[in-house]
Amino acid sequence: MGLCKKLLIGDGITALITLIVCLSLGLTVGRRNFKSTFFSRCEKFTEYDCQKLWDAFQQAYVNKDPCKVPVEAYDPLLAAAPFKHQCNKTMFWSQTNGVVHGLTAKRNDCFVTLEDTLLGSVLDNLTWCGKEGSNDTFTTGCPEWSKCENNPVHSFWNRSSAAFADVACGDVTAMLNGSINTPFNPTSAFASIEVPRFKASRVKKLNVVMVIQKNARSNCTDPSLKNLTQVLDRGITYSCKDVSESQIQECGAKPEIACGACW
Ligand SMILES: *[C@@H]1O[C@H](CO)[C@@H](O)[C@H](O)[C@H]1NC(C)=O
Ligand SMILES: *[C@@H]1O[C@H](CO)[C@@H](O)[C@H](O)[C@H]1NC(C)=O
Ligand SMILES: *[C@@H]1O[C@H](CO)[C@@H](O)[C@H](O)[C@H]1NC(C)=O
Ligand SMILES: *[C@@H]1O[C@H](CO)[C@@H](O)[C@H](O)[C@H]1NC(C)=O
Ligand SMILES: *[C@@H]1O[C@H](CO)[C@@H](O)[C@H](O)[C@H]1NC(C)=O
Ligand SMILES: *[C@@H]1O[C@H](CO)[C@@H](O)[C@H](O)[C@H]1NC(C)=O
Ligand SMILES: *[C@@H]1O[C@H](CO)[C@@H](O)[C@H](O)[C@H]1NC(C)=O
């Protein structure tokens, strides 16, 4: 696209033609990039048929109004690549993206987040949507969440985080952010989608790891955590520990540290 940018510094009709050519080129490249990103990320997981997953994925939003994609549209995709029970390894997070994935990238023997699973990692950071009357996948001009909640990206993350929480079992961990005022925020996916799905029949314990950075504003004594204990299914044991960011990084850097000894 760098070439297109340079060519646009022409004038008159030439610029117009160049603009049209470049726009359609950009759209095609965007679409092709999306599909090839999907496949190249998917192919890292050798146990799945990526073409089948692509078909199941596309049927959720293709040829639909991008503001009318319900969470259930992804049920066939979830059925095609179900999450495994990862007892004691399931890791949830809210507002700690960098630190939590820095850790799980190195210690997948200990912790697995949604973004480390096949579906989560394939679609991480991507934007996509369909359009009525077209079978294409678009990556630009897709509706923002503020415009409509039932958009293809939001519905996917809503459905997949619910499914990921459904299979959580044993001791589960949640990494929350001690640098913000309300670490357990009722509007977060963790609070609104995941926690309500933890059932005492499967989940024994919820261990909250409060990430403490230099600019700490809250910790395990924060009142929002009282809300967490109140909504948690009775029978699930709750614990919270303030853990410095450097200690979490240490656990990532030293594979010899036992999972249970990370904090
Ligand atoms: C999960 O961890 C608990 C506590 O350490 C242990 O008792 C249990 O056996 C573990 N379960 C599995 C499936 O590893
Ligand atoms: C916690 O939130 C603050 C403020 O948004 C952000 O600067 C910081 O990186 C977050 N901490 C972690 C561990 O992600
Ligand atoms: C998504 O973005 C984050 C932050 O920029 C990055 O660390 C992560 O590797 C990206 N994920 C994928 C699958 O590329
Ligand atoms: C979209 O795909 C369906 C099923 O493969 C096909 O019947 C339809 O003609 C296609 N529509 C367009 C606009 O290409
Ligand atoms: C997730 O989807 C459900 C079902 O459509 C909906 O009730 C809920 O508001 C959504 N949650 C979020 C955080 O978007
Ligand atoms: C936790 O935060 C409260 C309120 O900001 C503060 O008074 C207290 O000293 C903190 N506790 C620890 C152990 O850091
Ligand atoms: C606790 O939950 C109640 C009800 O949802 C809400 O009104 C209140 O603001 C929450 N408190 C904190 C500290 O998050």
Image: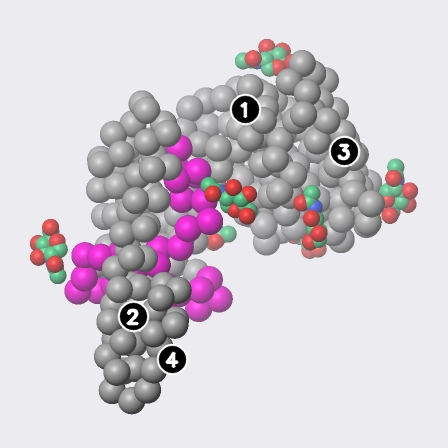
**Residue 108's x, y, as percent?**
54, 24
Callout in the foreground (2, 4): 4
The residue tagged 3 is 246
The three-letter amino acid code for the residue at tag 2 is Leu
Image quadrant where one finds the N terminus: bottom left
- Quick check: 86 above or below 104? above
Q: Is residue 189 left or right of residue 121?
A: right
143 vs 120: above or below: below
Q: Quadrant of residue 2?
A: bottom left
Marks 2 and 4, how far apart at CA: 15 Å
- Mark 3 closeness class: few <14, some 14–19, many ≥20 residues within 10 Å: few
Please provide percent x and percent y for residue 212: 78, 40
Q: Which mark is residue 23?
A: 2
Residue numbers of the magenta segment: 118-147
Marks 3 and 2 sit apart, C-alpha to C-alpha, by 46 Å
* Residue 162 placement (x, y as % from top left): 46, 39
- Mark nearer the N terminus (3 vs 2): 2
Looking at the image, is mark 4 or mark 3 earlier in the sequence?
4
